[in-house]
């Protein structure tokens, strides 16, 4: 059976989690309250506007839709400024070797990210050109945990969901994978990712063929 891989981007292939979180912290500070590391995990994988709601709830800050759009834009400007310095140093350990092995093994690959900055990040690194399609936050109507982003990824690979394996570091992303009928690999700590088919700490020292054997 032929399998394709669909990768989430932030936290799976690139280390941008702190770039995002620092920008949310700055936004909270600018509104007169602080956010702590306790909400960091809950901000992973979800859209910018859904993240904003969590951040504002932390500070008990009420805003109407128009103000929320401005606040999200302010956070994004800080985030994009942080990204200016992004290069191959943001690629997580083991990723380039894993991708090279996928190519050797003829495993087709696409990206399924919640981020509207996915293209920008990838274009700044050696990940550029490695994927059949980069599906990001601008391409979908419904954010994770809706499976739309992964269904578009599967379509670009010409494979049904049951022949695609999703790599995710967030619970919302794994929920999306499950709802879409995909197999999933959690990246990170097993305790944070109880619904993944398997969990590995990162993509270091594991062969893509082993992943396929383990989840199918
Ligand atoms: C996800 C991140 O990949 O993208 C979230 O895990 C982030 O933390 C989301 O909020 C949206 O990103 P962006 O770049 O569109 O604000
Ligand atoms: Mg992620």
Image: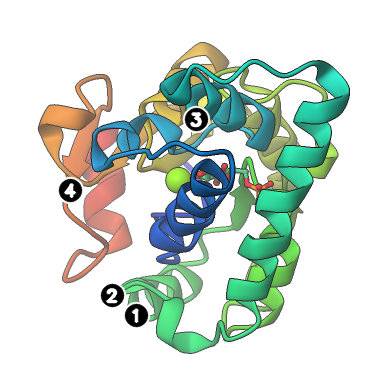
Residue at the image position 82 percent from the left and 33 percent from the top? 69
Name the residue tied to disc 2.
94
In the image, residue 178 above or below residue 124: above
Do the numbered discs 2 and 3 sit on residues whose CB atoms are within 8 Å? Answer: no
Do the numbered discs 3 and 1 sit on residues whose CB atoms are within 8 Å? Answer: no
Residue 213 in the figure: left or right of residue 55: left
In the image, residue 58 above or below residue 2: above
Q: How far apart, in angstroms, are the residues tagged by discs 3 and 1?
A: 36 Å
Quarter in which the N terminus is drawn: top left
Residue 203 in the figure: left or right of residue 78: left
Q: Nearer the viewer, mark 2 or mark 1?
A: 2
Q: Which mark is residue 134?
A: none
Residue at the image position 44 percent from the left and 72 percent from the top? 99
Respond yes or no on whether mark 1 lies under 8 Å from ligand 2.
no
Respond yes or no on whether mark 4 lies under 8 Å from ligand 2.
no
Nearest to N terminus: mark 2 or mark 4: 2
Query: Does residue 129 appear anywhere in the picture?
Result: no
* Secondary structure of residue under mark 2: loop
Name the residue tied to disc 4.
200
Residue 96 at x, y percent in the picture: 40, 79
Q: How far apart, in angstroms, are the residues tagged by discs 1 and 4?
A: 16 Å
Question: Can you name the residue that lies furthest to the front here?
Answer: 32
Residue 70 versus residue 108: which sits nearer the camera?
70
Q: Which mark is residue 55?
A: 3
- For label 1, the crowd category at 10 Å Cα-Cα, with few meaning under 14, some 14 to 19 and many 20 or more, is some
Q: How far apart, in angstroms, are the residues tagged by discs 2 and 4?
A: 12 Å
Do the numbered discs 2 and 1 sit on residues whose CB atoms are within 8 Å? Answer: yes
Residue 110 versus residue 87: which sits nearer the camera?
87
Q: Which mark is residue 97?
A: 1
- For label 4, the crowd category at 10 Å Cα-Cα, with few meaning under 14, some 14 to 19 and many 20 or more, is some
């Amino acid at each position: 059976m032929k399998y394709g891989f669909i990768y989430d981007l932030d936290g799976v292939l690139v280390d941008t989690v702190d770039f995002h979180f620092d920008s949310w912290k700055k936004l909270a500070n600018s509104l007169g309250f602080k956010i702590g590391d306790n909400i960091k995990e809950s901000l992973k994988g979800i859209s910018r506007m859904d993240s904003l709601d969590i951040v504002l709830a932390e500070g008990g800050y009420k805003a109407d839709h128009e103000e929320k759009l401005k606040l999200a834009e302010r956070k994004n400007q800080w985030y994009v400024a942080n990204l200016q310095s992004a290069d191959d140093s943001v690629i997580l350990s083991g990723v380039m070797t894993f991708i090279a092995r996928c190519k050797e093994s003829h495993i087709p690959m696409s990206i399924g990210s919640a981020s509207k900055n996915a293209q920008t990040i990838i274009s700044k690194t050696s990940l550029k050109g490695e994927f059949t399609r980069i599906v990001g936050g601008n391409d979908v109507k419904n954010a994770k945990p809706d499976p739309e982003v992964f269904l578009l990824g599967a379509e670009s690979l010409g494979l049904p969901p049951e022949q695609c394996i999703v790599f995710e570091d967030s619970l919302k992303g794994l929920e999306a994978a499950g709802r879409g009928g995909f197999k999933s690999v959690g990246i990170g700590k097993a305790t944070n990712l109880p619904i993944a088919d398997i969990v590995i700490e990162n993509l270091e020292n594991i062969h893509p063929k082993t992943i396929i054997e383990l989840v199918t």
